[in-house]
Amino acid sequence: MKKTGTRPLKGIYDQINGAVPHCPRSSGSTLPPQPNHGEPGSRQAKAGRALRTRRLIIASTIICTTLLLATACNDDKTSGSPTSAPASSSGLPRAGAPAVRSPLKTDLLAADPCGAATKTEVEGVGGALKSTAAEDIASGRGCAWIFAESAGNVSGALNVGQPDGLSHLYALKAQGSGVTTFKPLPDIAGYPAVEYANGGEGKGACQLAVGLRDDVTYVLVTQLRRGNPYLDDPCGLSVKIAEFTIQHLKAVQ
């Protein structure tokens, strides 16, 4: 994904109902020049820069994913609470998407997005974390797990802004536009999943959506760098975190 520079995030949010965005691979977490609110090298200034860096990483990685999945394939919209677990969703699945056999309530992720995976769980598969942080995004809240030693990050968020779940991605694939990578994966803990992208494919990069209900997906954006044990298999790490997420959701049904 591109670094956002000084472009206001609202401008990015405004694209949600527009064309499917191209999501280029991240070139890092470099921030534009920031005002110095303390002496150079002071603890206060360093803390401020770290906070801005963390927020930029979280926002940029999660926003691009929710933009792609929130883009409408057609004019049909459904409504309802993103945290309820209806027995079925009208007209879903469609476009060849698999049905979610055991829909999950997602209240846990709405209230505590970083409850998807604990620090211990993520470090057990991906290495030491520098930080874990929840952040508000256009369609709700997401979580970013940022690895130590600049080894990359994983961001996850419920996609409640696009009510068609995995059917949306399958429809984009059927149209022949909107996705440059589309690869159905083996079920993750019993739930269907797709690896997808709209540009930006490359070493250490993975975008994955897992259907928690026919109308709701959980999306993970992974950007790994040298030093991460999953650098050559970023989707493998995404799958692991998705497994943790589903386990935590099942525990509170």
Image (cartoon, rainbow, N blue to C red):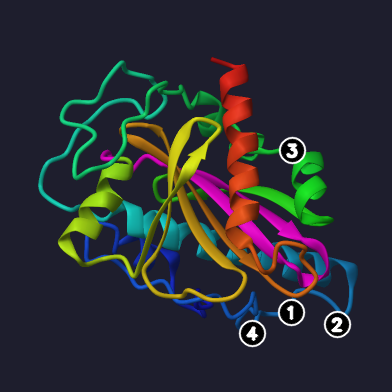
The tag earlier along the polypeptide, 3 or 1, is: 1
Looking at the image, residue 230 lies above or below residue 150: above
Residue placed under numbered mark 3 in the picture: 118
| Cα–Cα span, label 1 and label 2 | 7 Å
Provide the residue span drawn in magenta. 141-164
Please tell me whether residue 137 belongs to the stretch shown in magenta.
no
Q: Amino acid at mark 4?
A: Pro
| Cα–Cα span, label 4 and label 1 | 9 Å
**Label 3 near label 4: C-beta < 8 Å?**
no
Q: Secondary structure at mark 2?
A: loop
Residue placed under numbered mark 2 in the picture: 40
Q: Nearer the viewer, residue 204 or 43?
A: 204
Q: Residues within 10 Å of mark 4 (few under 14, many from 20)?
A: few
| Cα–Cα span, label 2 and label 4 | 14 Å
Which residue corresponds to the image point at 60% horizontal and 75% vertical from the top-left? 203
| Cα–Cα span, label 3 and label 2 | 35 Å
Residue 36, numbered label: 1
Q: Nearer the viewer, mark 4 or mark 1?
A: 4
Q: Nearer the viewer, residue 161 or 10?
A: 161
Q: Nearer the viewer, mark 3 or mark 2?
A: 3
| Cα–Cα span, label 4 and label 3 | 33 Å
Please tell me whether residue 143 belongs to the stretch shown in magenta.
yes
